[in-house]
Amino acid sequence: MHITLETKPFAALETDALVSYVFDESDPIQGRISEIDTAAGGFLKKLAKSGEFSGKPLETTLLHAVAGLKAVRLLLLGAGKREKFDNAALRKLAGVATRYLKTRSVHNFAFVVRENDATEDFAQAIVEGAIAADFESDKYKTDKKNDKFIDSLAIAGYSDAERAAGEKGLARGRIIGESQSFARDLINEPSNKLTPKILAEKAEAMAKQAGLAVEILDERKIADLKMGALLSVSQGGPEPPRMIVVTYTPADPKPGAPVIGLVGKAVTFDTGGISIKPADGMEKMKYDMAGGATMLGVMRALATLKPNVKVICVVPATENMPGGTAQKPGDIQTAMSGKTIEVLNTDAEGRLILADGVHYAKQLGATHLVDAATLTGAIVVALASINVGVFSGADQTWTDKLLASAKAVGEKMWQLPMDDEYREFIKGTVADIQNIGSGKGGGSITGAWFIREFAGDTPWIHLDIAGTAWNDDAKPWLAKGPTGVALRTLVHLAMSY
Ligand code: BES
Ligand code: ZN
Ligand code: ZN
């Protein structure tokens, strides 16, 4: 998508659609909308009076050939209450405009921001929203005659004095938006097209192109390093595992400065192993590598945005298969850290591979950890597909920093409790720990506690994205399929250094 910033008066914009938004307020024809109304000879006021639009969230009103405008169409979007309007609402509106117009085979539009909204942050949000909304899962469709796409977007409503800020936001939004699409493309790949080996190759290609350091550990190196927890999962099938390490180092690294470790679960297909999953819906388990893909997307963005902090990304990648060589319930494995694990359920494999991933990230020098994983079905019960589940180690300051980033970029996240009592659930009877809880309930918390055992005293956050990484139903601003959730938060977190 070609995206530009336009400082011309909107009435003179030659575009297939001029898009703006109205608030839910007693007189919606105010400020910039009133300027458009004046150009249109009072037409909008008349429509507003007749109740044609209310400004309610996500309302769409499409008007054709409005006199006084050079644009072919005028699309007015409902923005809800003015007091509640923020970058998250704007991002969604840019997405709604993109999807609404492209389904009508409109290929370009100008998005006009309201009075007071011509900021860097808002330009970024519009670009992110438009790129995210343009994403479709049609790579494997052979009929390429699809004319439902947007090829250019002009962001308008910025004055000459506001141009520099707008351009800055636009550039950042593009990097983040495209990195999110990179992650979503990976998540979409079926398991026959994206094995751990192929994921590692794609990560390596991305890192080299972006100028990031990369190291891929193959199955021999993984065995040499005694990553027994990762190996126990990969032994169930013929595809060898990979441990992917991508590192960003700032230009002027300071000794003793914090080092962020991003660890992402990448199970390229989760059958459940011997504790096999039901057939119904199993196809969705191709997205069990969303955590890893998201972390790689974060690294891709950071390579260009260049935060002032070192970031090490560790992605353990494997299939979870029920072959003849698969681990069996009751097997005892030794993780890289030396801890022994009784594997009571082979379907709780994400925590096993993260055990070695987290331990390795620490060994590589990470002082502050975040892991992201499609870890538990239980998080869907707790938070549905609305909030990412957040679990914190002892250092709440680190978690608060992440939650502040999530808020700033409009990603919904909700922290769950990690009382010591839950830790009892995974105390082992025959090994140090067991990979599922013996108590009833709290499945997402026991999963988090298991990983925490390997983070130790290092500040650590676990993000359970099982409910939020995949969009089951298309939304007006987002296609069905992978979401790339948490990427924007983690980029913001790194950029806050
Ligand atoms: N990959 C699944 C979790 C999952 C479930 C992701 C639904 C996306 C949607 C994970 O490996 C798993 O199977 N977890 C088990 C854990 C249980 C055995 C303790 C689960 O949630 O059922
Ligand atoms: Zn599983
Ligand atoms: Zn899994």
Image (spheres, grey):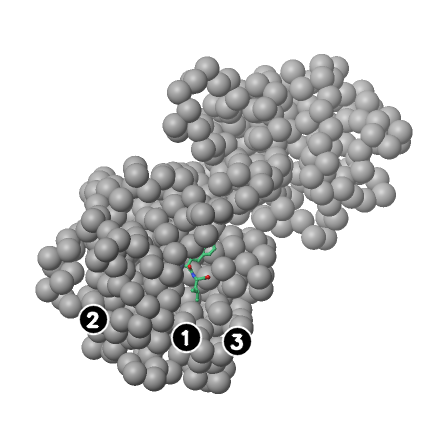
Q: Residue at x 25, y 67 (%)?
A: 229
Calculate the distance from the C-alpha at mark 3 to the C-alpha at mark 2: 29 Å
Element under disc 1: helix
Asked whether residue 200 is in view, the answer is no
Q: Is label 3 or label 2 in front?
A: 3
| Mark found first going from the N terminus, 1 or 3 | 3
Calculate the distance from the C-alpha at mark 2 to the C-alpha at mark 1: 17 Å
Please state which of residues 116 and 259 is positioned toward the viewer in this rendering: 259
Ligand 2 visible in quadrant? bottom left
Quarter of the picture holding the C terminus: bottom left
Numbered mark located on residue 440 in the image: 3
| Mark found first going from the N terminus, 2 or 1 | 2
Element under disc 2: loop
Numbered mark located on residue 394 in the image: none
Numbered mark located on residue 336 in the image: 2
Q: What residue type is labelled 2?
A: Met
Q: Residue at x 56, y 24 (%)?
A: 102
Q: Which amino acid does label 1 sit on?
A: Trp
